[in-house]
Amino acid sequence: MENTTQAKSPAKRISVNTLVKIAILSAVSVVVMFFSFPLPFAPSFYKLDLSEIPVLIGGFAMGPMAALIIEGLKNILNILIGGTTTAGVGEFANFCMGCSLAIPASLFYKRNKSKKTALIGLAVGTVLLTIVGSALNYFVLLPAYSYFMKMDLSAFVSMGTKVNASITDLNTLVMFAVVPFNLLKGVVVSLITVLIYKYISPLLKK
């Protein structure tokens, strides 16, 4: 019996260790999520935050499943702490967009752990983030915000027109605000992750 217990204990320690890392990165991601700011080319309701950085770090260190869990916990904790104005629709969209960036990036890195594959994965993830973000904004997010905030979609278009005269309808709002917003977010988050990962990864490997 003692040998069996000893054989299982390392696996249990590894499991608990991973869970602790996931919990810490999820908590950090939630805190970072509260620090957001608007961009000059997009309406003020689009705010850039860097909460995907802990998700990417977790994905690179522990694999795509860890990134998925961290992204999910981040949005659940965000609802529990700050509530939601869209019955969870906005948080679900954030989860989908975050996963579209972090999962491809961590999958590429898992197959071959090098800076080159990390950059390729981040580039693929940024493209997917832009595509998924645009589709979700057009079909889900903006209609949901319109419904829950009791505002016509044209009101959101008008807010976009104030910062960019080229925005005249929902299509141009997505093209000239949502697409560059998500591209910029993907690039900024990716660059910061690449710069700091080598300093943080030794701590996560302990």
Image (cartoon, helix red, strand yellow):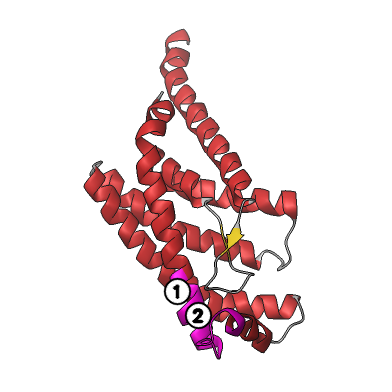
For residue 194, what is the image quadrant? top left
Q: Residue 174 carries which label?
A: 2
**Would residue 100 be seen by someone viewing this image from the given angle?**
no
Residue type, mark 2 in image: Val
Residue found 59% across the figure and 85% down from its top: 161
Residue found 61% across the figure and 85% down from its top: 157
**Residue that numbered label 1 is attached to:** 179
Q: Position of residue 12 (x, y in %)?
A: 48, 24
In this view, the residue farthest toward the right is 150
Earlier along the polypeptide chain: callout 2 or callout 1?
2
**Would residue 144 be seen by someone viewing this image from the given angle?**
yes
Q: Bin the neighbour count of mark 1 within 10 Å (Cα to Cα): few under 14, some 14-19, many 20 and up.
A: many
Q: Position of residue 174 (x, y in %)?
A: 50, 80
Residue type, mark 1 in image: Val
Q: Position of residue 109 (x, y in %)?
A: 29, 46
For residue 169, what is the image quadrant? bottom right
In this view, the residue farthest toward the top is 2
